[in-house]
Amino acid sequence: MLKKSKEIISQNIVAISTGLIAPLIIWVITRICVQIMPAIDELASSKILFPLLVVSMIANCILYALLVINNKKSKMIDRFSVKWDKDKNAHCPICDRHLINYGYHGLSEYKNFWCSICKEPRFLLDDGKYIELDHAKENLNI
Ligand SMILES: [Zn+2]
């Protein structure tokens, strides 16, 4: 139960952080706007501000869409001490390198992936016990 909660939180940490920070940002922006709007009104007419507002809103919508698309592409889940993409390919939990060389590396008696960037073995563990790659892929539930 606790492990499942940790997985859910780690997978949605960006959304949770945004949700927690967004009210504060909105409050700060409204405070700033209340202070500077009279000065802006004096400097520029609404004929300039309204098109700028529309362009800004369109740019924000485009950036948000790109962020959502990019987030879906790179979404990986943490399971069995490594990260997995939607095609059940293992990735290093530290550097995200695609791990392909599953076998015996170093002096270990257990099979593992060797991360060539981190220069460390990445073992597949389920509740602290070593498991095989086939067993991990069968139990991924992706
Ligand atoms: Zn690595």
Image (tube, rainbow, N blue to C red):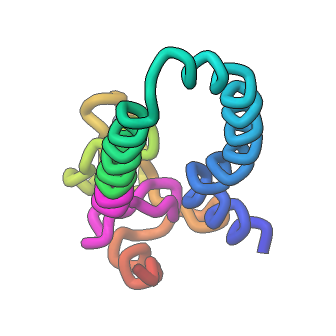
How far across and down, in percent of the image, does residue 118 sit?
Answer: 36, 29
How far across and down, in percent of the image, does residue 63 sit?
Answer: 33, 46
Answer whether residue 129 is visible to the viewer in this image: yes
Residue beneath the point at 40% across and 48% down: 57
Residue beneath the point at 25% across and 33% down: 116
Q: Is residue 142 magenta?
A: no
Q: Which of the pair 56/137 is nearer the observer?
A: 56
How far across and down, in percent of the image, does residue 121 sit?
Answer: 39, 41
Residue beneath the point at 27% across and 64% down: 89
Which quadrant is home to the N terminus? bottom right
> Exactly how many numbered labels are in the figure?
0
Residue beneath the point at 33% across and 41% down: 51
Which quadrant is home to the C terminus? bottom left
Q: Which of the pair 99/8 is nearer the observer?
A: 8
Residue 128 location, quadrant = bottom right
* Direction from residue 131 to residue 32 in the image, left or right: right
Answer whether residue 121 is visible to the viewer in this image: no
Ligand 1 resides in the quarter of the picture at: top left
Q: Is residue 80 magenta?
A: yes
Q: Which of the pair 38/116 is nearer the observer?
A: 38
Q: Is residue 65 above or below residue 38?
A: below
How far across and down, in percent of the image, does residue 85 sit?
Answer: 32, 64
What stretch of residues is rendered in magenta? 67-90
The residue at the far left in this view is 100
